[in-house]
Amino acid sequence: MASGEEGISELSIADDDWGSAAPKLQRNLGILDADQIELAKGLLNEGQSHLFAHWPGPGVDDEKKTSFFNQVLRLNAHYPGGLTAYIRNARHLLVDSRSGKNPYEGFIPSVPSGENLRFGDDNFIMLEEVGVKEARKAAFVLVAGGLGERLGYKGIKVALSSDTITGASFLQHYIECILALQEASLELSNGGTIAIPLVIMTSDDTHMPTLNLLKSNSYFGMRPGQVRLLKQEKVACLDDNEARIALEPFDRYKIQTKPHGHGDVHALLYNSGLLKIWCDAGLRWVLFFQDTNGLLFKVIPASLGVSATKGYHVNSLAVPRKAKEAIGGITKLTHIDGRAMVINVEYNQLDPLLRATGHADGDANCETGYSPFPGNINQLILEIGPYMEELSKTHGAIAEFVNPKYKDSTKTAFKSATRLECMMQDYPKTLAPEARVGFTVVDSWFAYAPVKNNPEDAAKVPKGNPYHSATSGEMAIYRANSLILRKAGVQVGGPETAVFNGQEVDVWPRVAWKPKWAVTFSDVKKKVKQGCSISQRSTLVINGKNIYLEGLSLDGTLLINSNNEAEVKAIGSVQNKGWVLKPIDYKDSSFPEESRIRGFVIEKIEQLKMNYNEPGEFSLQ
Ligand code: UTP
């Protein structure tokens, strides 16, 4: 132990300041190496002597002591500025939180400018085309490190099926969408090859299951090298307003940790060197998205088109927001000192901010029936050049916050340990006022249906507000697909109302297609001819690139599978008993959890299944 002696003398000097821990540590110096001693000193200097107060002399629990320092080393390495910076930042934020400091003091809110999209109109189609061209210069980043506590599903969220009729998991669906975009973009360019990169941010809670899901499914058709997993680390929990680090109640050699939030994605991307690699390879866009939104890719091409045509450095996807709805509002904030930014203001902060700045009604709807501040859905498109430039200044550090649950109004003690958190969408907070920060508003029906809430909580959602459950997420996909086919000229029946897991939902025909069939609305229009109809009780799965609906009349269940060399025309009438949604009870453990959280199973009574695996032209009559 090269610097052991030095460690002993330095630890001895400030014995008094370091309280009772110093002698306990000193007795253990023989088992610590130089790095560990440095870390110990850093912790003691930051008022963390309690971490060692229970340490017995050497020879007792030595392995646990080493593993404690291994954890400290990791926590130190994964936070910009190390644990010292973390503890100091926490102290500041805890003081602000305790005093109820308004984070937007001095800022005046106003409605920023952005683009409103209407699905399927000429502008939308034009933007989709631009977006598909740009996709060859894009990289996708899926943040999938969240615990999903609200959903309470035992597996990882990306392994859940986005819909029951195809059974494709969210991850499979996302990858197939990216591959379809890749192919469409290649077709529009002058040849060459493209492999759109996909990064998945995982955490200790999700990393191995995500990797296993990919490996056991051959990366769902992506090249393994095209997908990169970056694991975020958790941060230390804090016991009190002095930011004293919390130990696990049942293991006093282990620091309690919790997720730091999806804001970690920026530092991980920067530190991995990937941004530089992408920049050098001529990529222009990074698209961030979340783990359970089965609709998102319906709006990706057009939104990317908005970024490209408007030259947005930051483009946040948003949906119309009802006043006081529990999603953040995208807001322009201008400070009296001249600073300005366009950021997400959390819904519970928007109302007081508006009231404090002369808007007597606070967070209220305007003449459109919606809040003038669009609702942030946390899907971001960043232009790589300016993004890299900014991160080279900040190293990816994102404004943090702390949200302790205090025991009482004195705000001196917490109900449970807290920690610092950061959010991906807070990235624009540090940008200069001249940065081009905009947003794209899209209707929820084709853009946003996340699966976040468990059935019991979803059933308690006030009427008119979205459930954001596995049930509503799946029904939203059928609704969107039905409405898109309607817009393309198909007569689509429905919807009918049903109640699953206590949630009243509209049930449209169960229609789903693989992304290779259509990745834009133009694709859908090209593949659907007039004179088609689909009844409300029908189920249709289109799994093949060259399948054309030409006068199909469907009343029942039809599944069409074809390979790329087959061209299939779906003509004529298909009628059978079809598939029926049968309600089940959430608590009925005889059903798999995947079904229980939806509140239904599909009874497959009768179907027509057509497979075309040979090259050639076929017609389904
Ligand atoms: P959510 O708001 O859905 O949070 O995260 P969550 O942690 O997954 O679920 P709850 O709050 O425990 O119920 C939005 C997105 O950010 C990711 C999630 O995986 C999801 O895609 N996320 C969240 C991370 O990647 N890391 C985090 O630390 C938190």
Image (cartoon, rainbow, N blue to C red):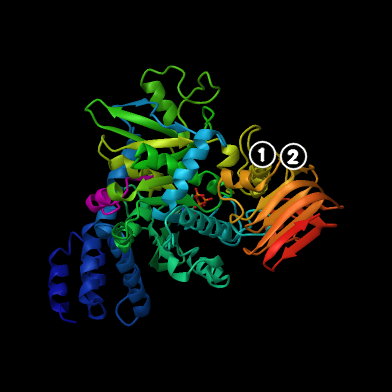
Magenta residues, as a range?
388-402
Q: Residue at x 51, y 59 (%)?
A: 179
- Dots 1 and 2: beta carbons under 8 Å? yes
The front one of 573 and 340 is: 573
Task: Name the foreground residue: 492 vs 600.
Answer: 492
Secondary structure of the residue carrying numbered label 2: strand
> For residue 576: magenta?
no
Residue 585 shows in the view: no
Decide which of 531, 484 is in the foreground and name it: 531
Q: Is residue 524 above or below residue 175?
A: above
Residue furthest to the front in view is: 617
Tell me, for residue 592, which label it has, or none. none
- Establish if 280 lies above or below 473: below
The yes-or-no answer for disc 1 within 8 Å of ligand 1 is no
Badge number at residue 492: 2
The residue under label 1 is 483
Q: Residues within 10 Å of mark 2 (few under 14, many from 20)?
A: many
The amino acid pointed to by label 2 is: Val
In-image side of 502 versus 432 (left or right): right
